């Protein structure tokens, strides 16, 4: 009997065969915290008197501030707390305004097939590198940071087969929204999602990371993919080809559920307020006017996303009355897009370009919508109040649909404005 | 310490109440001051809740309570608000861990059988939910062994200090 990808990775770590359903205490290869989970961790360490101890391995712990440049005095003080703790322990440190925590992890540190625990829910993203990666809160991170270990119940797996060529105007985000419409936001709670099939292999890492980032948004513990040439190319670009290794799935593993998605039949989708599972064809929402469009977040703020948006907006202008915010994921993405003229094209079209950070995704700052306003965002969540105003409505889409919508001012299937 | 029983009033909530709803991101500056933050708990879902909730009242949700972000402040401020336990058909995975890590009790059960305002008597020894206004009503539930062990110690860090181990 074969193993699921999650069983494979965890068996290797435990040096024995583990099976879905058993609870294990596993060694963590890389751990990270951001300014959401970091400050409470530091306070807990101090309260409990653990702050005199070293972390399990400072070279494998990262603190990254995501809300930067800093919006308030209180958050500046929280940043200072993490900054001095990281410095004292010798951990990696990234300042606010250089990107979100996950980009720092996969651009600089992550090894294929490793166990990665981050104090953030979208940690599922790192499964695109064949990793077991899951998010947790600050108390769990206290144990991870002190001992380099965490307890995990080995999850059952849903295998998601995605096959066929994507049509023009359809992207990896649409695959994930389609999946959300099938399994809703809670059927995959505690599960591992194993994404397979030729459509997934055809995607770049930028595209794959969109899918795995949103694993948590259907409740999953982790979302995993095999590694291949695209993975290697990405790591080469980051100057870390040695962190590549091949992770391959089995055909005869036990899957709790198998879901087949025919990519050739997909069209551009949006998720309507206030739940991701409210999925509709973009073209059926063409009467919906928007006030603001946001292209960015850990789900869709990578180089390819910027290229797709610029391709649509180049030489044109954002519709009057629409604010278009563009936020690259990381300093790497920012510099790449600056070098190749992508940011210039977007700025000329009327986009407001911000320093790499989470932006308004979590409603902290840098683009909060007004009362009654409608936003189309490429982020991963559209809960009421998510972007900082409970009276605003949030639609979610791919960067292409977002760019097309910014052009017309109404929710627009990108096919209508492309080529 | 898990108490033997808890009595309180049911506050009903729908499905997919996210941690954004429990602890809104726009109030993130209050994070260093959880008592203040607790005054806003669940304010986007039910504005009157934070003001009117009584010690040991219950949050009774439909499904997927606590989905979304990993912010641990969410269960912390529910506990600070005095909530006795959260009942739901299912819970967001990270919220579940964060809640038990902070000694906050979560109960999975068929919440359709509970109405807004019902006064519940939850027997944690026998694991059964009863209603003050309906003596015939009795709904059993199970608590996972992990939840009992960690919540009994008042949270994960106490547990680790006592047993010197992460094995649960
Ligand atoms: S971009 Fe949004 S979802 Fe991603 S880490 Fe930042 S706040 Fe969280």
Image (tube, coloured by chain):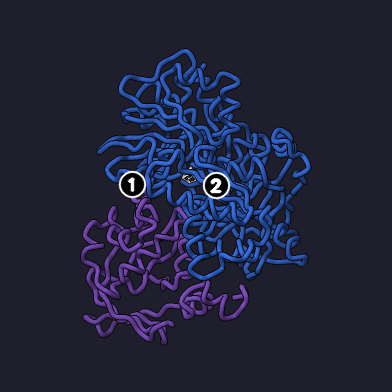
Image x and y of residue A154, in percent: 63, 64
Q: Position of residue A112 (x, y in %)?
A: 71, 48
Task: Give me the disc on residue A118.
Answer: none
Q: Colour of chain A?
A: blue
Q: Is residue B89 left or right of residue A136?
A: left
Chain hosting mark 1: A
| Residue drawn at the location 37% of the way across and 46% of the way down | A73
Residue where numbered disc 1 is placed = A385
Residue A331: name its quadrant.
Answer: top right
Residue A113 vertical placement versus B123 (above, below): above
Do callouts 2 and 1 mark residues in contact (Cβ within 8 Å)? no
Q: Which chain is purple?
A: B
Work out how far the residue at label 2 is from the one at label 1, CA to CA, in angstroms. 24 Å
For residue A64, the mark is: 2
- Of residues B97 and B163, which is closer to you in this image? B163
For this rendering, which residue is in front, A41 or A401? A41
Query: Is residue A172 in view from this perspective?
Result: yes
**First in sequence: mark 2 or mark 1?**
2
- The subunit letter for the residue under badge 2 reads A
Foreground tag (2 vs 1): 2
Local SS, label 1: loop
User: Which x, y percent locates residue B68?
Assistant: 44, 53
Residue at 29% x, 46% y is A390
Would the CB of label 2 be found within 8 Å of ligand 1? no
Q: Position of residue A398 (x, y in %)?
A: 49, 33
Which of the 4 image quarters holds residue A196? top right
């Amino acid at each position: 009997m074969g193993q699921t990808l999650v069983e494979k990775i965890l068996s290797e770590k435990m040096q024995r065969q583990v099976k879905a359903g058993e609870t294990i205490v596993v060694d963590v290869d890389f751990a990270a915290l951001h300014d959401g989970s970091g400050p409470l961790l530091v306070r807990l360490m101090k309260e409990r008197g653990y702050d005199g101890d070293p972390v399990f391995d400072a070279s494998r712990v990262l603190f990254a501030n995501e809300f930067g440049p800093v919006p308030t005095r209180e958050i500046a003080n929280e940043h200072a707390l993490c900054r001095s703790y990281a410095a004292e322990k010798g951990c990696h440190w990234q300042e606010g305004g250089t990107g979100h925590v996950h980009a720092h992890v996969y651009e600089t540190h992550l090894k294929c097939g490793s166990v990665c625990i981050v104090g953030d829910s979208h940690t599922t993203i790192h499964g695109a590198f064949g990793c077991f990666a899951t998010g947790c809160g600050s108390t769990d991170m206290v144990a991870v940071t002190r001992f380099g270990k965490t307890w995990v119940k080995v999850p059952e797996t849903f295998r998601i087969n995605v096959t066929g060529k994507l049509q023009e105007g359809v992207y990896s985000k649409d695959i994930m929204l389609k999946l959300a419409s099938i399994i809703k936001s809670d059927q995959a709670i505690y599960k591992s999602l194993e994404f397979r099939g030729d459509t997934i292999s055809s995607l770049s890492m930028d595209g794959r990371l969109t899918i795995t980032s949103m694993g948590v948004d259907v409740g999953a513990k982790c979302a995993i993919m095999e590694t291949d040439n695209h993975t290697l190319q990405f790591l080469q670009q980051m100057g870390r080809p040695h962190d590549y290794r091949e992770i391959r799935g089995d055909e005869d593993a036990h899957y709790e559920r198998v879901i087949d998605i025919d990519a050739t039949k997909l069209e551009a989708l949006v998720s309507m307020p206030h739940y991701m599972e409210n999925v509709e064809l973009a073209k059926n929402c063409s009467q919906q006017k928007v006030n603001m469009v946001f292209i960015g977040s850990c789900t869709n703020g990578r180089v390819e996303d910027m290229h797709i948006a610029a391709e649509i907006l180049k030489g044109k202008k954002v519709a009057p009355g629409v604010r278009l915010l563009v936020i690259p994921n990381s300093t790497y993405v920012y510099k790449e897009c600056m070098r190749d003229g992508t940011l210039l094209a977007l700025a000329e079209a009327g986009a407001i370009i911000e320093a790499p950070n989470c932006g308004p995704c979590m409603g902290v700052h840098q683009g909060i919508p007004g009362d009654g306003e409608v936003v189309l965002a490429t982020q991963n969540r559209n809960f009421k109040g998510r972007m900082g105003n409970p009276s605003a409505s949030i639609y979610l889409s791919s960067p292409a649909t977002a760019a097309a919508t910014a052009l017309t001012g109404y929710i627009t299937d990108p096919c209508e404005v492309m080529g | 310490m898990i108490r033997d029983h808890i009595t309180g009033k049911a506050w009903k909530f729908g499905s997919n109440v996210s941690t954004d709803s429990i602890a809104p991101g726009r109030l993130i500056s209050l994070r260093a001051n959880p008592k203040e933050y607790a005054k806003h708990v669940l304010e986007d879902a039910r504005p009157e809740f934070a003001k009117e909730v009584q010690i040991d009242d219950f949050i009774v949700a439909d499904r997927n309570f606590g989905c979304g972000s990993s912010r641990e402040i969410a269960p912390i401020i529910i506990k600070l608000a005095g909530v006795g336990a959260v009942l739901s058909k299912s819970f967001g995975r990270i919220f579940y861990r964060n809640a038990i890590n902070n000694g906050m009790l979560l109960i999975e059960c068929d919440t359709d059988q509970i109405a807004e305002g019902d006064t519940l008597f939850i027997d944690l020894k026998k694991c059964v939910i009863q209603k003050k206004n309906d003596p015939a009503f009795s709904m059993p539930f199970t608590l996972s062994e992990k939840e009992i062990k960690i919540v009994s110690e008042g949270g994960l860090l106490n547990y680790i200090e006592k047993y010197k181990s992460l094995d649960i």
